[in-house]
Amino acid sequence: MSSYILRRLGFAVITLFSVLTLVFFIVRILPGDPALVVLGDQASQAAIEALRARLGLDKPLIVQYGEFMAGVLTGDWGTSLVSGRPVIGEILNVLPATIELTVAALILGAGIGIPLGVWSAVRRNALPDYVIRLASLLGLSFPAFVSAILLLLVFSISLNWFPVMSTGRGETLGARLHDLALPAINLGIIMAAFITRVARSAMLEVLGQDYVRTAKAKGIAFATIIWRHCLRNTMIPVVTVIGLYLGVLIGNSVLTEIVFNRPGLGRLIVGALNQRDYAMLQGLMVIYTLIVVLVNLLTDITYGFIDPRVKYS
Amino acid sequence: MTHANTTAAPRRYLRTMLRATGTALVKAFNTNKTSWVGLLVFLAVCALALLAPVIAPHDPIDQDVFQRLYGPSAEHWLGTDVFGRDILSRILYGARISLVIGLVSIGLAMLIGTVIGLVAGYYGGRLDIVMMQTMDVLLAFPSLILGLIVVAMLGPSIPNLIFAIALTAIPPFARIARAPTIAIKDREFMEAGRALGYSDRRLMFRHLLPNILPEVLVMGSIWIATAIRVEASLAFIGLGVSPPTATWGGMIREGFENILDSTWLVLFPSLAILIVVFALNLLGDGLRDAIDPRLKGEQ
Amino acid sequence: MTQPVLSVRGLTTSFRVDGAWQSVVRDLSFDIAPRETIAIVGESGSGKSVTALSIMRLIAEATGRIEGEIRLGDLDILAASEDQMRDIRGRDIGMIFQEPMTSLNPVLTVGAQVSEVLRRHRGFDADAARAETLRLFDLVRIPDGARRFSEFPHTFSGGMRQRVMIAMALACRPRLLLADEPTTALDVTIQAQILELIRDLQTEIGMSVMFITHDMGVVAEVADRVVVMLRGDKVEDGPASKIFASPQHPYSFKLLGSVPQLGTLGGSDMPRRFPAFEEDESDPRASGKFAAEAADEPDKRGADLLQVENLCTQFTMRGGVFARPTGRVHAVENVSFTLRAGETLSLVGESGCGKSTTGRSLLRLVEPSSGSILFEDQDLMTTSRAQLRAARRRMQMIFQDPFGSLNPRQTVGAAIREPIVVHGLATDAAADARVDALLDQVGLKPEHATRFPHEFSGGQRQRLCIARVLALEPKMIIADESVSALDVSIKAQVINLMLDLQRDLGLAFLFISHDIAVVERVSHRIAVMLLGEIVEIGPRRAIIGDARHPYTRKLIEAVPIPDPDRPSRHIGRVTDELKSPVRPLDWTPAQAPMVQVGPDHFVRES
């Protein structure tokens, strides 16, 4: 097991390193001088030169790369071109709100999706199965901002149950949850739709396995077969897919944060794009990379705990 | 190969490949009737988009300051927007943008991704590790963020959007193509082919490709849905094809500012996105169930 | 007569296929007396497995229907409630399956899986269940049970997994054991152990056994009585000795007559065709008769065609954090042999002995590590890629799974045509004529060319594969377990086809098989492989009749003989495992020399 974790850790470090390199080059390879993009066409040559110097763009590429990597490691992610404050500080300021949102969505998504998927598979081709399949497919068809707007229209504007704006703050737990509810439900339902489908097909595959027949031949009750024999096997692909879903989840959280005007990385990135805050953008890409690599590592390790075959391979 | 065959071979190849893939897809369609519903709705949307210049009641860009924010009426079935433009006409024209971006970007991603997955899976070893590790790195990065940044840097035009979305869809297709490639490449008919002295290229493109193509095409329909969603999302954030061109995401973005009093501005384009995406998902999902070899054999 | 343990009357099981009910078992009746072993035999699709599942009522109700009467003692199984059935399954009726590799749950320890039955049916608590499970492990001879209790199935070999399955099935000392092809997936020496284990435990527990198999040798070993099934119908039943001595129904007659029986060729040196069965092919129920035992094949052996010397093929195993090499699989170790034109040399051995890797190494489908392969005086190890491809044309290969060997998306005509075109052997028009001729040569019709592989039966598919390799006019064919997956009557026909081709075209065969009874029929010479090495090689008659190496003897003794009157063998309480050819990195083979013990007969000193 420890060798497996070490190996996954090794892969994580390699992935981190390559994505960071990719981030560095994406920002520099894409046409358009960042300084020119920031300042606009009318800027004077001197101003552009000054900004280039401030951003370190006048140095050779390899030096820039070294400084970038060193900066990432030491926590020096540059200063925002707009606010003049350290990028890392601004990010850490809103990171908890985004994490709160995505974790809530994950709990909702898995909590709803796995039972529904399993139920759907067990009742294959019966009414619940058709309803669940159609509903989950519909859920998957919503762009996150469309569903967010609909939730906002119904529950905040018409019914007035939840605030129109989500502040991401709140003194008491109740206030915080009230504030979080709609954005989390929005992300959670879309994720649940996705997990339902994965859990269903994984469960169907497991139900067709020989060892389920063996368990039946042992006289084990059906509920026990599902619970003891099938669920853990079903979780193997589900965990992998939840890890892969993270990218979608992050994208959806950006849209959700915009619609509910909720502080978080999503609003930060849109703000940075609008204001051409190039340093902030780079910092955001670094933090996204860190999150993705970390979560993938976690899924890999979880996977190792669920599937005993992994330890030995 | 003898000379007599060199000219006939490509045509024969294409014919058998299309025939085999077609048979598999038709069979899949017949086992899953909901796919037909999805296909018909999608084709209807395509037809409406193609005919937009003929059937649209108004010009999608012409502003009319005297008819701003009108609700649905006989003159404007779906109402007008803040500039007095006809929503129905803008939705019809918007469909063209969504469909073009969705189809072309996924077509490109499918082509490149499938070749990458096929080659990596077939040869295996170091090449596979390097290629798939690269794909994983790309896959690891949230695609919407990558799309955002690429479009923001390049500027919001149709080709740039296609490029950005295709870029994010290549890794999944490489994965989609690689999995069955690995499963099939060690099947006995591949080994038999090697023993019969067939070249790698022949084995990959004549024997392997037809076997994985149905799966890739089916996933394609689901990914077109995803691409349309991503395009709308980018437009909603403000990185779609620049105004005043009508895009569904852009219409929702503009309508969102008047959401309190003119909900139809948001509702109708939302519905348009939902219908297309749902139809494509219905189509692809039904087919996928029908061709998924893992789900066969159970009673 | 005492009351039977199980009584089946008029059993008809149907499945709904595309909206219509299709019966898979029809009007089947039989009884199983206490302590009796009944064998249900038949070829694939005869409905024998469905019979077992019907008795357990494990047919999905939505898509399957069981009619008739099944009585377990006094209990009407088909009228029992689902709760009653769950009590019966695992307690009164135990069941073991064909695929030990997939029949155990990969995420639960084997101990937990066996304990589960005890806790479910005998009300044991965790500790008592554990103690009883360890006793059962001991009973089924799983060594080191206490340690293996908490291990997961993937660390067990196939034979060991089947022992776990048996422990599970017998945990509650059931009245009836349903064994569905329990040894089919196992090697022959392991099969002998498992059969003996089941027999011993049957005596100890005093249960009845319903043994499902297609292997007439196994039937003769275990069965008191036999039920012969054909496409869902029972065609004959009776005491085993009677069925074997004088089968009444033409199908039983044909089935038994097609079984290769080890040692029947006796003093002959040449291969011999199976006696052809003359019948109306459209109706296997109609009577037919076997032609007289065929004459030996003529000796048409020519000069040396293939000379293999010191062939080694190794695979490196990697593991750990940095995927460092941790060991090496010595799949083929210093293998040398020659093959003459028109000759058949068989490579026999159990799984993992390297016989298939040897075959693939010759064609360089896997890359050998060292050695020389001299084929038609050309060294394939040092030759260029182009020359290798030309050589591959003259040395062809057919595989085990005839369905897997044909591209499912290609018509069979295109499949046979493709090698002709690729190697430029004929023009477009001539190629089509050649395809027709080849189909005819393997006993198929030209109109078959436009069909897809799934439209053919297993035996026909193997004929197609043979036609495809014949298209290249090879001198030699490597047949890797090519008839192993076929039903016994089809097997005989394909073997006869191969012998005909050898006679007509002067083909040499390297016949790779684990089935020694078949090997005896086709071979001029036999080489026995163990752990990557040839341990004995010589003329067929000498190897079968006068084996010198202990492993060869063990292998031959383990082959079940289709003769129920032969006293059952006792190999004792053996739990051999097949050894693994995985070696540490610094391992150097210490190979004993081969010594000559007879004309052309060599054995490795041990």
Image (spheres, coloured by chain):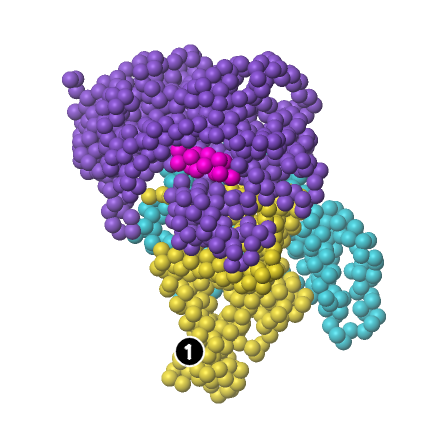
Rate crowding at label 1 as few (under 14), some (14 to 19) or many (20 or more) other CA atoms within 10 Å.
many
User: What quarter of the picture does the N terminus of chain B occupy?
Assistant: bottom right
Residue A201 visible in the displayed image: no
Across and down, in percent, residue B101 comes to 55, 68
> Residue tagged by mark 1?
B78
* Highlighted range, magenta: C491-505
Residue C253 appears left or right of A167 = left
Which quadrant of the structure image shows residue B145?
Answer: bottom right
Q: In the rendered view, tell whether residue C243 sits above or below residue A180.
A: above
Chain letter for the yellow colouring in the rendering: B
Residue at the image point whose x is 19% and y is 21% from the top: C4
Residue at the image point whose x is 26% and y is 26% from the top: C247
Across and down, in percent, residue C6 comes to 22, 25
Q: In the rendered view, tell whether residue C280 sits above or below residue A88.
A: above
Residue B111 inside the magenta-drawn segment: no
The secondary structure that most of the magenta stretch takes on is helix
Residue B82 visible in the displayed image: yes
Residue C538 appears left or right of B88 = right
Q: Nearer the viewer, residue C454 or C483?
A: C483
Residue at the image point whose x is 62% and y is 70% from the top: B159
Q: Amino acid at mark 1?
A: Leu
Across and down, in percent, residue A291 comes to 61, 48
Chain letter for the cyan colouring in the rendering: A
Name the subunit of mark 1. Answer: B
Across and down, in percent, residue A70 comes to 77, 48
Element at badge 1?
loop
Residue at the image point whose x is 28% and y is 30% from the top: C252
Chain letter for the purple colouring in the rendering: C
